Structures are given as structure tokens and as C-alpha cells.
Amino acid sequence: MGAVDEASKYTIILPTYNERENLPIVVALINKYMEEWKINFEIIVIDDGSPDGTLEIAQKLQEIYGSEKIVLKPREKKLGLGTAYIHGIKHASGNFIILMDADLSHHPKFIPKLIEKQKEGDFDVVSGSRYIEGGGVYGWDFKRKLISRGANYLTQILLRPGASDLTGSFRLYKKEILEKLIKSCISKGYVFQMEMIVRARSFGFTIGEVPITFVDRIYGESKLGGSEIVQFAKGLLYLFATT
């Protein structure tokens, strides 16, 4: 990867809920790759009242890395992904925003690749994709892979989004583009990521893709269950009817 221009700053927004084991590892890895590539960055941790002490861990990390690098913007309870991002953007000092999961399913080694791709084509959005050559999923059983693939295939047919991975949440946005997209999105939770890409296409924003490998969470419990699948189906029909 070539040198990143010094005018660019990247804000990584990490919404957390019960991630005390994962947070120190993901922060250390982000720091490692950003320092390696001399990328100007900050991490905004938005903890939604985790009962497992995630916020206390985040406070310790802030002591280690400094309050310039680790910005804490906790909330009292779980209020959903979309509102976490809105909350994070308000405090972001970067002109680019990176959204990723804090549970190590998204490896920070892909961040420089997202940044490089954005520079290459001046893309408004760069999405990490599990479904293009070089991408993949590890740690999922056949049933979960089938549900994910099926959901993605169905989405491609109904919405023609111009991107291969609709439900992934590892993405880089120009800050002003993300602000506009979030204001236009109505969905919450699992469907939110999908709506962001569909809205980006309808606004005519440019979307780049980078292959990523998704690894099922190492510590803690997955937050995807039957209710999310129902929510996804409803969301897909809503988007099909309104876009």
C-alpha cells in the first residue's frame, strides 16, 4: 500500500455490547496496522451499557493508547446499531469513517486495503465483501452459510444493489456520504447495513469492494438468531417496495 496523504483522518466506530475479551485484541490490532501504514486514526468506542465490564476495559485501553486515539462515548442501554453510528459520527474528527464489528469477525488487517481501494477510485463507499474472489467465511456451519448466501442471493435478485455483500458491516465511507445515508435510512439492526448500500445506489454514490474473510466470533455469543432472519425478510420486502 502506498503512503496515505496526511490530510486524511480515519475514524473507526466500534459499537460494543459484552465485548470485554475481544475489545483489547481488536484495538491492539487496529493500532498495529494503522501505525504500520502511518495512517492517522481514532477509535470511537460506543458501549451500550454492557453488564460484563466492557466500558471499564475501554477506559483502561484509553489510558494505554491515549484519549486522542481512543474516544469513549458510552450510552446507558442497548439502542441499536443505526443510532450508535449516528452517535459516533457526531464525535468523529475524521473525514472518513470506518464501520466494523468489535468481536474480531472483521480482521483489522483489511483496513489498509479498504483505504487503498477508496484512494484508487475516489469511492464514496468501500465495502468489505465475503462474496467476491478472495473473500470467504470461516467458523460457520453449513446451515448458517446457506442462510447468508441465500439471503444475499435473494437480495441481489430483488434489489440489484450494485454490490456483492449486502449484509456485511465492514465498510469505509466518506463522512458526508455516511451522514446523508444514515439520515435516509429507516431500518434498524440487521437490515440497516443492507439499506445503507441500497440507498447509496439510489443516490448514485460510487461503491468499491475489497475481498475480506469473515471469522465467526471467538469470544461471547453470536447476536444473530431467528428473530433477525424474520427482521431481514421484512426489511427486504420493505426495501423492494420503497426503492
Image (spheres, helix red, strand yellow):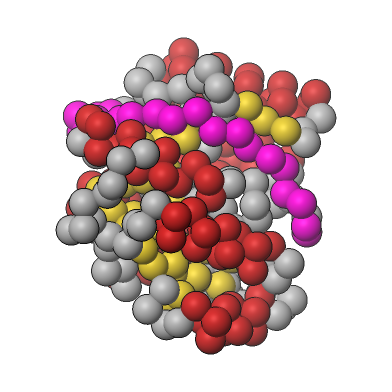
Give me the residue at 61% from left, 33% from top.
213
Task: Tell me residue 10's x, y (percent).
Answer: 33, 58
Front-lying residue, 11 or 37 = 37
Q: Is residue 61 above or below residue 119?
A: below
Give me the residue at 63% from left, 37% from top.
214
Task: Tell me residue 22's x, y (percent).
Answer: 68, 62
Residue 89 visible in this rendered orientation of the protein: no
Give me the residue at 55% from left, 82% from top.
64
Task: Tell me residue 40's x, y (percent).
Answer: 32, 62
Quadrant (top left/top right/bottom left/bottom right) for the N terminus: top left
Residue 228 visible in this rendered orientation of the protein: yes
**Residue situated furthest top in the rendering:** 157
The quarter of the displayed image where residue 93 is located: bottom left
Give me the residue at 51% from left, 20% from top.
132
- Horizontally, is 66 left or right of 234 in the view? left
Q: Is residue 217 magenta?
A: yes
Quadrant (top left/top right/bottom left/bottom right) for the C terminus: top left
- Horizontally, is 221 left or right of 59 in the view? right
The quarter of the displayed image where residue 239 is located: top left
Front-lying residue, 222 or 158 = 222
Q: Is residue 208 above or below residue 67?
A: above
Task: Tell me residue 151's x, y (percent).
Answer: 59, 24
Which residues make up the magenta segment?
201-220
Q: Is residue 160 magenta?
A: no
Front-lying residue, 25 or 132 = 25
